Image (tube, rainbow, N blue to C red):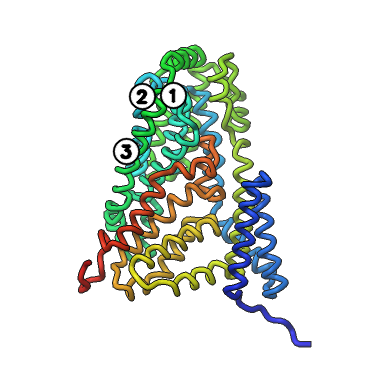
Amino acid sequence: MEEKTNRKLSVAEALILLVISVAILMWGVLIAGTPTAISLMISGTICALYGSVVLHQKFDYIFGHTMEIVSGAMPALYFLMFTGAVSAAWIASSTIPYIIYVGLSIIKPQIFLFAALLITALTSFCTGSSWAIVASVGLALAGIGQGLGIPPALTAGCVVSGCFMGDKWSPLSDSCNLVAATSGRKSIDVSKSMCATSGGALVISLVLYLLIGFKYSSNTDISQITEYISQLDASFNMSILALLPLAFVIIMVILKFPILPVLFGGVVIGVLEAMIFQGQTLSQMLTTCWSGYVCDSGFEFVDTLFTRGGIVGTADLIMLFFAAVFFAGSAESIGIIDVIVQLLTKLIHTAGSLVAATVATCIGIVFLTSSDYTSIILNNRLYKETYKEIGLDGIVLSRTVAESTTTIGAICPWNSSAMVASAAMGVSAFAYAPLSFPTWISIILAIIFAFAGKFTPKVQGESSK
């Protein structure tokens, strides 16, 4: 009997498996209400079984591909764990309460979203680290927004998109440098190319968030804010020294020290301050960093806001990550991504359709692989020659990939960036994704400019439209 050999996935098979996987995910989220990790595990199992039984691939190959993805993402998991410890330690040390205390005192509801977007975008751009900013500044802004009566999902959408917009735009960030490295361009050129798209999205979003802020300002009870300030003052020993852990992290990130040791240092400073100024013992703080801070002030607003954090609090997100990696490894190893990408490239006829197709594959690969880095690498390699054939400068490819990966990772629930953001903001990615205006507007502008022939340079020797 002739031994069966493995074969490649057909277009029809890839489309069917993709539709089934998406249907399972949507059913779990919108109808069944089951954890997303379960849906991802089911989808991953279906893909793995199909590859093993129908395509005759060895299961060791499929699972081995998954393990390669896990190995590359381990730093993200450790960062996620540190985020839980940072949250707990900085609450116990009054770092976060003090920032919220000051924020409620000086920031008005009508300009909060405007200020939050501007602050997060600028700090992330200057540091090149979205994770560090969302885990520190974002954590504080979430509390301020809650105190001002802003819906948590709206605050999260504003803050998260600001953090990751600044990151993708910064020539100091790893994502911008990865785009540059894989496309053969300089990071500063990639950053400059996004002035029209990210810059335009920032201006439009600032206006939108400002208009929305005026809506909520009319519903805000100023006397209630005053009461919140009094409750915070009564619950913690407030001091400007509480800002030391945050200042340490921001300065070290600007100086380009490795982020994990920096976060560990931030936790240590927070623990010491909690022991010195808040009367905590070392054993209490170690338990707090592990299990989370439990606030028992007697004030409902304060207790609800600050009972959170801890390494254990990130366990659900870590499990979601492993489920996502299993699905991504299975889908990628049996060839679903390759087939879908090849199908899309056949539909390209104009500059606009090329950019639109690039956006579609960038977003699709982020959601399928849970990795914006994978999407950056694959799409830059995939479209490099096609952009030349269409007559577009390669910087357009770099910009399109940058706009459609890093910020999309921040709204993909099973991406590590979204997990870090969700842990810091206390809001699921499903809830804040539609309200992340800069993310969507920058992508829309990239497509519009391509179809209109504006801010879309041609290769040298080609005339501009």
Location of residue 402 by image quarter: bottom left
Tell me how many marks there are: 3
Q: Residue 300: give x, y in percent of width and height.
A: 57, 18
Q: Is residue 295 visible?
A: yes
115 or 212: which is nearer to us?
212
Question: Split into 4 quadrants, where in the image is the N terminus?
Answer: bottom right
Q: Is residue 255 visible?
A: no
The vertical placement of 363 against 248, above or below, is: below
374 or 448: which is nearer to us?
448
In percent of the image, x 36 and y 28: which residue is there?
214
350 or 159: which is nearer to us?
350
The vertical placement of 436 against 39, above or below, is: above
Q: Residue 359: give x, y in percent of width and height.
A: 42, 60
- Residue denoted by label 3: 207
Question: Split into 4 quadrants, where in the image is the C terminus?
Answer: bottom left
Mark 1 element type: loop
How dense is the environment of label 2, judged by Cα within 10 Å: few (below 14), some, or many (20 and up)? some
Whole-angstrom CA distance, mark 3 to mark 2, is 17 Å
Q: Are marks 2 and 1 in contact (CB under 8 Å)?
A: yes
Residue 148 is labelled as: 1
Q: Residue 166: give x, y in percent of width and height.
A: 36, 45
The vertical placement of 115 against 76, above or below, is: above
In percent of the image, x 47 and y 70: which residue is there?
344
Location of residue 403 by image quarter: bottom left
Is 26 left, or right, of 53 in this rendering? left
Q: Which of the two labelled residues, at mark 3 and mark 2, occupies the earlier sequence position?
A: 2
Q: Which of the two labelled residues, at mark 2 and mark 1, occupies the earlier sequence position?
A: 2
